[in-house]
Image: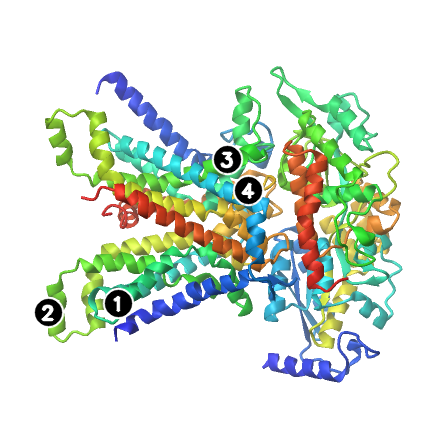
């Protein structure tokens, strides 16, 4: 392409990148500013004297490490749960004969059609009635199974060579043995895809943790960040932005370094149509 | 025997998906006492109240507007960006990685940052306007602008995912198709229109369905940015459910459940329309 | 095991001594024996990490030390005020209530109607506790008739804050702050500064669209926010916020914003506070709770004044805000009595002085002012004297006691929506407030129906 068009092309790309990056850039810049700078108007874009004080302050004011732990634990438990339940069900649908198989699969599909917000109230009441408000089970239990996982894995398993399966059976391999020793290792891409999707969904959850966590010790990271405004010490945005930056580190690392794996995971349902 | 494999999932679905759905219906037919217990059977009265309530009408309008303002721009802009990122030029990998940044944000982190941008007194956006001698805008305090502002934050957040998915979809289109077209004398715009877009329709359709559902379920950004205000301008259906059931000392679980079932119906209807009407135009290879 | 013991004891209490104060038997007079290791009191409060929580924990520790082996109070942060109330409501259903809880002022009617609280008056009468040293204007909010339901604990009031330096620069006397809405407007006209491009750089006034302020203006004019004696003669059946006075206030606010004299920062109080601290607004109405925060972060001389009147002849006064302490009644009598010991402890003058000087909330006990730490603090924060003077200058009547309404949190929200609609010119002030009253009516009706109020 000709020189000037190339220049324009790059300029456009840079402009778009800047717009998409701006919130992150401002969060980084603001977290390094002092409270005084952020209380003036118009607020400066770059810190005059960068300081790390806000990071120290935010870690002292809220139990950030605990919130990280909560989010990580909850997300890990949910991911494990979904991988297990989905693998088992998808295996049954893909390989095993059973009566009413199609009807049962329709039941699984149906769960994908019910939006969580339509049933959030009864689920909340269930937790409240059983004294589970502000506990880990409340954060984890409703999400241990998801129809999407079964759907995704079944799709993948259906493409598995039948002969291998039959040969294993003839050899006296039990279902679980086959599943664990042969199918799972060969299904790594699909399992990774589901795992990443499940983990990220759980990590980013907001509405449900908002309802069922009531104290700082149980809050997940997302709730903790959104509550920064209420904390007494949060007199200026630098405090809030520092907390936000700290919360973004894992996902930033993930997408900047692991982009290829994520893309594979997310597009699992998309590209093949 | 095979059932044993399904039992874990089915048990969980029973407890946390199907039974709650039935309970939602039950609650919607009952009014609550001051603690929230469904003590009074009121039949369909709460549904009737919804149908005749001008506030609820506004809620539905807000929901439709918000969905349109989020889905259409995030798909259109996402597509443009994804096409630009397909170019084989130096440094495109870096652009692609950096442009995925919104995907690293969650609803909570993005909303917190945008809240600072939109701040009425000392916000960054009004600071920009001031710098250019322009009058400030009530991004979140002006009812005519608040919904669009929240949608802006949502579009930014959604672009990360959309661009990633569309890029993957574009890359899946084999080069040979373009080669063949180029040999036939086709030029870039024609190729985009006659080759790229049709072959991209599965991905576009998938993204349309997903983005619509995400939009209809949006909650976090509204809660953090506006709490449904100003004057109810950003109260969508999900937020209305939240307010009636959990906010401001409310525990009107019955009335909120009726709204929750309306949400269910809308999601079903929208998805059905998308699959029934639009999926026909998807070009599967 | 402990639950079994408590359950059995509750059975004894319920069947053996009398329940809820009916008849002549006082539920505190049963002879239930406290457990050998001491009584535990679970206390839920709504203070997030910060000075208030620290002060709470310090007082709890002091109490536990003084009552080692007999009573142990465990204080837990249960979420902000809304969340604590929600958690409490959920706890009623699942029978997982604390022994003592802090609930905000607007949750008072609900708590009374919930049926799970033991009125403070019961303990006061049983112990013959004297309330003569407690500020009557503060007790007034939580009393119906002369029966005190909960013990006020963290008390705040609204004040007018202003930037003295900006006043001087504009040629206004910094020691003569405006006292009525009209005077605020007149001052704002002199204080609002524009730059060369016509952009406003400094607004005369700014306040969050916070329903509490409208309640204050109503009481300031000695008017009742809701009917039936502000909900104190019997359950209120309607809101009265579309009366001429309220419409006048909303109209004033609308004109201030639309004439460019006031900055509209929306409902969030932090946003309005930040605008004031940054010098974007010169006058600001806010709670006494923000005094210390303002003092430590503003770069100008801070002035405080009485909360403005709607007009010079207004005869009322502001309402106290904050939260109070409630004791749950579904507990063994020794637990309730132990909680009452803690309540009394918190109201002692030296602890009130500690509380006041560490949080900036009002001392409920008048004797606290004699405490040397308190006097020292008052010298450091002379602006607080304005608040105390304002409290003493208020005549206690039904209007200044504040509206007691079961759905008060929702009513406050409806008022905010009304003000927003007026200020952003979606509706006229009269229509906006009429609609606010109309939207709340069904909720008030179903609340009254649910509690069987006539």
Residue C250 horizontal/vertical position (percent): 73, 35
Quick check: B22 above or below C304? Answer: below
For disc 3, the neighbor class at 10 Å (few under 14, some 14 to 19, many from 20) is many
Q: Which image quadrant for residue B136?
A: top right
Q: Callout 1: residue from which chain?
A: A
In three-dimensional space, the C-alpha distance between marks 4 and 1, rounded to whole angstroms, equals 44 Å
Across and down, in percent, residue B262 comes to 48, 53
Asked if marks 4 and 1 touch (Cβ < 8 Å), the reply is no
The quadrant holding residue C444 is bottom right
For mark 3, give the secondary structure: helix
State which mark lies toward you, 3 or 4.
Answer: 4
Mark 2 Cα shell of 10 Å, populated few (<14), some (14-19), many (≥20) = few
Dot 2: element:
helix
Toward the viewer: A41 or C400? C400
Identify the residue position indicated by label 3 in the image.
B149
Residue wearing tag 1: A101
The residues bearing labels 2 and 3 have C-alpha atoms spaced at a distance of 60 Å
Point out the tag, 2 or 1, that comes first from the N-terminus. Answer: 1
| Residue A211 makes an appearance in the image | yes
Q: Which residue is mark 2?
A: A167
To the question of a shared chain for discs 2 and 3, the answer is no
Precedes in sequence: disc 3 or disc 4: 4
Disc 4: which residue: B58
Left or right, residue C250 beside residue A71: right
What color scheme is it?
Answer: rainbow
Residue B35 percent location from the top left of the image:
64, 63
Chain ID, mark 3:
B
Name which residue lies at 16% across and 60% down.
A160
């Amino acid at each position: 392409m000709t020189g000037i068009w190339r220049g324009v092309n790059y300029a456009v790309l840079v402009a778009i990148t800047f717009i998409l990056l701006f919130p992150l850039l401002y969060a980084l810049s603001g977290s390094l500013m002092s409270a005084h700078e952020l209380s003036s108007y118009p607020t400066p874009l770059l810190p005059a004297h960068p300081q790390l004080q806000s990071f120290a302050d935010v870690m002292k004011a809220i139990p950030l490490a605990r919130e990280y732990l909560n989010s990580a634990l909850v997300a890990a438990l949910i991911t494990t749960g979904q991988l297990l339940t989905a693998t088992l069900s998808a295996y049954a649908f893909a390989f095993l004969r059973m009566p009413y198989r199609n009807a049962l699969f329709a039941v699984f599909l149906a769960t994908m059609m019910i939006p969580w917000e339509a049933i959030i109230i009864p689920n909340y009441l269930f937790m409240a009635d059983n004294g589970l408000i502000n506990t880990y089970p409340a954060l984890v239990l409703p999400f241990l199974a998801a129809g999407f996982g079964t759907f995704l894995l079944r799709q993948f398993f259906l493409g598995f060579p039948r002969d291998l399966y039959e040969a294993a059976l003839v050899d006296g391999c039990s279902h679980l043995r086959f599943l664990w020793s042969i199918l799972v290792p060969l299904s790594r891409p699909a399992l990774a895809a589901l795992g990443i999707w499940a983990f990220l969904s759980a990590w980013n959850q907001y509405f449900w943790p908002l309802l069922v966590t009531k104290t700082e010790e149980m809050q997940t990271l997302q709730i903790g960040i959104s509550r920064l405004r209420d904390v007494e010490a949060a007199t200026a945005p630098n405090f809030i932005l520092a907390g936000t930056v700290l919360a973004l580190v894992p996902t930033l690392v993930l997408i900047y370094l692991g982009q290829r794996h994520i893309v594979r995971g997310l597009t699992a349902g998309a590209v093949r149509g | 025997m095979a059932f044993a494999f399904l039992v874990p999932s089915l048990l969980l679905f029973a407890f946390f998906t199907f039974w709650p759905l039935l309970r939602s219906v039950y609650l919607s037919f009952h009014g609550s006492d001051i603690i929230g217990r469904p003590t009074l059977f009121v039949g369909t009265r709460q549904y009737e109240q919804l149908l005749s309530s001008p506030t609820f009408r506004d809620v539905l309008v807000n929901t439709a507007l918000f969905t349109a303002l989020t889905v259409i721009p995030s798909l259109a802009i996402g597509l443009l960006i994804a096409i630009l990122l397909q170019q084989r030029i130096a440094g495109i990998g870096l652009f692609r990685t950096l442009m995925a940044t919104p995907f690293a944000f969650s609803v909570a982190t993005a909303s917190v940052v945008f809240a600072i941008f939109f701040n009425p007194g000392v916000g960054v956006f009004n600071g920009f306007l001031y710098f250019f001698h322009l009058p400030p805008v009530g991004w979140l305090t002006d009812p005519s602008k608040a919904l669009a502002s929240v949608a802006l934050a949502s579009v930014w957040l959604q672009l990360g995912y959309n661009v990633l998915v569309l890029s993957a979809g574009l890359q899946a289109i084999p080069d040979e198709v373009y080669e063949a077209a180029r040999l036939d004398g086709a030029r870039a715009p024609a190729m985009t229109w006659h080759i790229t877009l049709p072959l991209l329709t599965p991905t576009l359709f998938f993204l349309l369905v997903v983005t619509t559902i995400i939009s209809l379920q949006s909650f976090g950004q509204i809660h953090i940015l506006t709490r449904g205000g100003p004057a109810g301008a950003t109260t969508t259906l999900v937020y209305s459910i939240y307010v009636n059931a959990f906010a401001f000392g409310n525990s009107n679980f019955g009335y909120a459940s009726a709204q929750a079932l309306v949400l269910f119906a809308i999601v079903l209807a929208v998805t059905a329309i998308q699959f029934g009407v639009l999926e026909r135009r998807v070009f599967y290879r | 095991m402990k639950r079994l013991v408590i359950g059995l004891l509750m059975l004894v209490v319920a069947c053996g001594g009398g329940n809820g104060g009916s008849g002549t038997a006082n539920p505190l007079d049963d002879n239930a024996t406290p457990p050998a290791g001491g009584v535990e009191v679970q206390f839920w409060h709504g203070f997030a990490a910060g000075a208030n929580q620290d002060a709470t924990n310090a007082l709890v520790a002091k109490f536990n030390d003084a009552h080692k082996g007999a009573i142990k109070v465990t204080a837990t942060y249960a979420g902000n005020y809304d969340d604590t109330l929600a958690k409490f409501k959920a706890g009623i259903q699942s029978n997982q209530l604390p022994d003592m809880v802090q609930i905000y002022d607007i949750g008072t009617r609900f708590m009374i109607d919930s049926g799970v609280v033991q009125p403070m008056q019961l303990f006061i009468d049983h112990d013959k506790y004297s309330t003569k040293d407690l500020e009557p204007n503060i007790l007034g909010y939580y009393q119906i008739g002369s029966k005190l339901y909960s013990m006020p604990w963290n008390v705040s009031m609204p004040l007018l804050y202003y930037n003295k330096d900006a006043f001087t620069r504009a040629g206004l006397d910094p020691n003569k702050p405006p006292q009525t809405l009209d005077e605020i407007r007149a001052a704002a006209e002199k204080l609002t500064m524009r730059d060369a491009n016509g952009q406003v750089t400094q607004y005369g006034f700014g306040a969050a669209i916070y329903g509490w302020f409208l309640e204050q203006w109503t009481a300031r004019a000695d008017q009742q926010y809701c009917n039936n004696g502000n909900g104190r003669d019997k359950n209120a059946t309607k809101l009265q916020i579309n009366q001429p006075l309220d419409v006048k206030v909303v109209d004033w606010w609308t004109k201030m914003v639309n004439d460019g004299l006031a900055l509209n920062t929306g409902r969030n109080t932090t946003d309005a506070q930040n605008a004031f601290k940054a010098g974007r607004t010169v006058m600001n109405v806010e709670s006494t709770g923000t005094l210390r925060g303002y003092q430590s972060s503003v770069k100008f001389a801070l002035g405080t004044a009485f909360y403005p009147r709607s007009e010079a002849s207004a005869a009322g006064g502001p309402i106290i805000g904050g939260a109070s302490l409630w004791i749950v009644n579904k507990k063994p009598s020794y637990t309730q009595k132990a909680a009452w010991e803690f309540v009394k402890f918190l109201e002692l003058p030296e602890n009130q002085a500690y509380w006041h000087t560490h949080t900036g909330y009002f001392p409920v006990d008048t004797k606290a002012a004699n405490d040397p730490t308190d006097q020292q603090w008052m010298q450091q924060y002379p602006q607080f004297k304005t608040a105390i003077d304002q409290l003493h200058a208020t005549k206690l009547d039904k209007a200044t006691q504040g509206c007691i309404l079961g759905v008060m949190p929702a009513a406050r929200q409806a008022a905010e929506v009304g003000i927003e609609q007026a200020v952003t010119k979606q509706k006229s002030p009269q229509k906006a407030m009429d609609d606010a009253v109309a939207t709340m009516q069904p909720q008030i009706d179903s609340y009254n129906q649910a509690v069987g109020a006539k």
